[in-house]
């Protein structure tokens, strides 16, 4: 039986294992903590990312290695390539770990970005802010996700506070973009170079963390074509294998590159029930060299992301075509602990279901922008 090794034992590894089980695939997870939630569905080895003796044992027990988050050290991924197949490749992982390299690649393949500048000193920050202007966002080049490692600079008077907060590591300054929409395209590329993408998804964030997703994003056929083409160029430039997400802003009707995630992605969770083949199954297929599955949408899909703690599931499960996912994590502020997906055949049907769920859970404010978008869709 084939065994996939996953570096990282969070909910993404958990859902990869659940998706791979019907294919007859076993999983082995390695994580630095012993109680990672993927251990509830797959065997887990506890090891530090640079414990190469333990990783050698891990590599000997698997047929291919992949990742459930992008902050595994690139040197660990490179070391693993000498012991087993690794997808996506270490170059793709390394590039996605560095916001400066990531934005540079975006521009090289024809995807515009907000203005940005490398910042290695306080003097660099002063010069960059003078060029880019305010407001701007100072970010760590590495290890930032879900709004972490960022400081919004509203005026030059914020420079000292921003530098005190983040100045110990390499940084990037990015222009703040008053975007109209946040979109993402989740795509997959096989070992043989076959490429497929899921419908464009519209996303809403709260405190830097994904709050809700709507797929397919309404009124976005032209943008979807552009986003898919850009994602394909990125995948081919990196010789990428597996699922990845390209996060985008829409500003004055055009796409701007925000970030790339070299893994299955939160904004693609709706595909578990909303597509014939989920992003998780397609990732397993891709890294094992199997044919890719159908990435079309089965209707209209809305995902609630549960942050901090789980609400009562009953109001969601009372709806037709509603699905609940508990990640088996202890509640904690800012922690992703689960999600729910509502599926429907029409925007009108989705509006009714979403409104009922939001009212029952006291999440009207969270759902309001999604309902506004759905209301604007012609019947």
Image (cartoon, grey):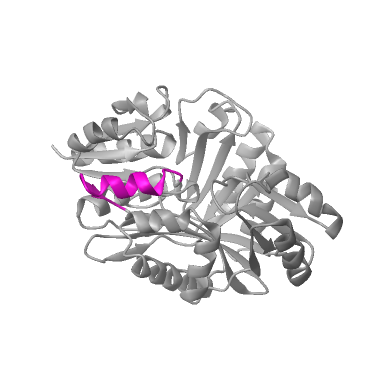
Nearest to the observer: residue 229 or residue 150 = 150
Q: Is residue 39 left or right of residue 379?
A: left
For this orientation, the residue located farthest to the right is 157
Q: Is residue 154 above or below residue 316?
A: below
Give the image location of residue 295, x and y in percent: 35, 58
Taking the spot 68% from the left edge, 57% from the top edge, the residue there is 121
Quarter holding the C terminus is bottom right
Quarter holding the N terminus is top left
Q: Is residue 62 left or right of residue 132?
A: left
Q: Is residue 63 left or right of residue 227?
A: left
Occupied quadrant, residue 361: top right
Residue 78 on the magenta segment: yes
Taking the spot 49% from the left edge, 42% from the top edge, the residue there is 341
**Magenta residue span:** 71-87
Q: Is any part of residue 60 visible from this angle?
A: yes
Residue 133 on the magenta segment: no
Q: Is any part of residue 298 visible from this angle?
A: no
Nearest to the observer: residue 133 or residue 21 = 133
Q: Is residue 263 above or below residue 195?
A: above
Give the image location of residue 43, x and y in percent: 28, 26
Taking the spot 62% from the left edge, 51% from the top edge, the residue there is 204
Give the image location of residue 345, x and y in percent: 46, 53
Nearest to the observer: residue 144 or residue 372 = 144
Q: Is residue 283 above or below residue 12?
A: below
Taking the spot 32% from the left edge, 55% from the top edge, the residue there is 89
For this orientation, the residue located farthest to the left is 1
Nearest to the observer: residue 310 or residue 100 = 100
């Amino acid at each position: 039986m084939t065994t996939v090794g996953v570096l990282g034992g969070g909910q993404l590894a958990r859902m990869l294992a659940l998706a791979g089980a019907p294919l007859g695939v076993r999983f082995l997870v390695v994580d630095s903590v012993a109680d990672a939630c993927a251990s509830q569905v797959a065997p887990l080895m506890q090891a530090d990312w640079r414990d190469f003796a333990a990783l050698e044992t891990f590599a000997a027990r698997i047929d291919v290695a992949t990742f459930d988050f992008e902050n595994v050290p690139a040197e660990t991924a490179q070391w693993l390539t000498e012991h087993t197949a690794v997808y996506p490749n270490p170059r793709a992982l390394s590039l996605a770990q560095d916001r400066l390299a990531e934005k540079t690649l975006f521009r090289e393949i024809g995807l515009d970005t907000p203005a940005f500048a490398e910042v290695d000193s306080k003097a660099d920050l002063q010069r960059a802010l003078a060029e880019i202007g305010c407001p701007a966002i100072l970010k760590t080049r590495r290890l930032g996700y879900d709004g972490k490692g960022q400081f919004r600079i509203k005026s030059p008077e914020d420079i000292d506070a921003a530098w005190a907060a983040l100045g110990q590591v390499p940084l990037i300054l990015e222009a703040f973009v008053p975007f109209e929409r946040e979109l993402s395209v989740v795509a997959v590329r096989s070992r043989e170079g076959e490429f497929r993408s899921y419908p464009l998804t519209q996303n809403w964030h709260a405190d830097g963390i994904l709050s809700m997703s709507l797929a397919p994003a309404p009124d976005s056929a032209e943008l979807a074509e552009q986003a898919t083409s850009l994602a394909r160029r990125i995948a081919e430039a990196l010789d990428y294998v597996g699922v990845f997400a390209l996060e985008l802003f829409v500003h004055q009707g055009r796409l701007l590159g925000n970030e790339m995630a070299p893994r299955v992605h939160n904004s693609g969770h709706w595909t578990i029930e909303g597509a014939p083949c989920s992003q998780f199954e397609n990732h397993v297929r891709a890294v094992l060299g199997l044919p890719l599955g159908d990435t079309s949408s089965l209707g209209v899909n809305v995902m609630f992301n549960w942050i901090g703690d789980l609400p009562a599931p009953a109001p969601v499960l009372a709806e037709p075509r509603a699905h609940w996912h508990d990640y088996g994590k202890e509640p904690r502020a800012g922690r992703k602990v689960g999600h729910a997906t509502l599926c429907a055949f029409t925007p009108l049907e989705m509006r009714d279901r979403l409104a009922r769920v939001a009212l029952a859970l006291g999440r009207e404010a969270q759902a309001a922008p999604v309902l506004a978008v759905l209301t604007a869709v012609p019947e």
